[in-house]
Amino acid sequence: MDLTELKADMDERFGDVDQRFAQVDQRFARVDDRFQELIDLILSEGERTRRHFDAVAEQMKSERNFAIDKAVAVDERTGRLTASNAADHVEFSARLDDHEARLAELEQKPAVDPD
């Protein structure tokens, strides 16, 4: 094999390699397209999931705030009832003291003879 034949053979083989690289490039382009579709799908699902969790978080915040408001209202009502009970207790205690004073006074008076 002389130099001209060797060069022709090498050029043919490099041509085959170039052709194979072109085929590989086409395959990679198809794979890249499929990966891009997958990336787009993942991104869109991520956005959808984010919106869903944002809605869930807002609902949880709303429910938490409702529970806090309800607890505050119950606490205020309990405070009002406690104050009302304390006022009633003072009134009942005053009446009881008044009755005790009247009983003590009656017990100290001598009995009156009915004749």
Image: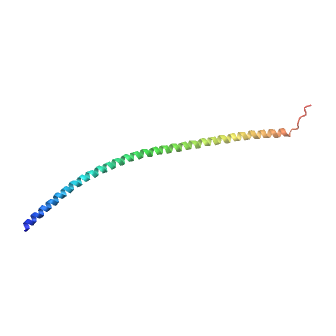
- Toward the top, the furthest residue is 115
Pick the residue in front: 99 or 36.
36
Q: Is residue 87 left or right of residue 62?
A: right
Q: Is residue 41 left or right of residue 9?
A: right
Q: Quadrant of the C terminus?
A: top right
Q: Position of residue 3 (x, y in %)?
A: 8, 68
Q: Residue at x 18, y 56 (%)?
A: 22
Pick the residue in front: 62 or 2.
2
Looking at the rendering, which quadrant does residue 71 occupy? top right
Q: Position of residue 47 (x, y in %)?
A: 36, 47
Q: Position of residue 82 (x, y in %)?
A: 64, 42
Q: Position of residue 53 (x, y in %)?
A: 41, 47
Q: Is residue 20 shown above or below 88?
A: below
- Toward the bottom, the furthest residue is 2
Q: Residue at x 21, y 56 (%)?
A: 25
Task: Please give the count of numbered marks on the rendered protein.
Answer: 0
Q: Residue at x 47, y 45 (%)?
A: 60
Q: Is residue 80 left or right of residue 45?
A: right
Looking at the rendering, which quadrant does residue 109 occupy? top right
How is the structure coloured here? rainbow
Pick the residue in front: 31 or 97.
31
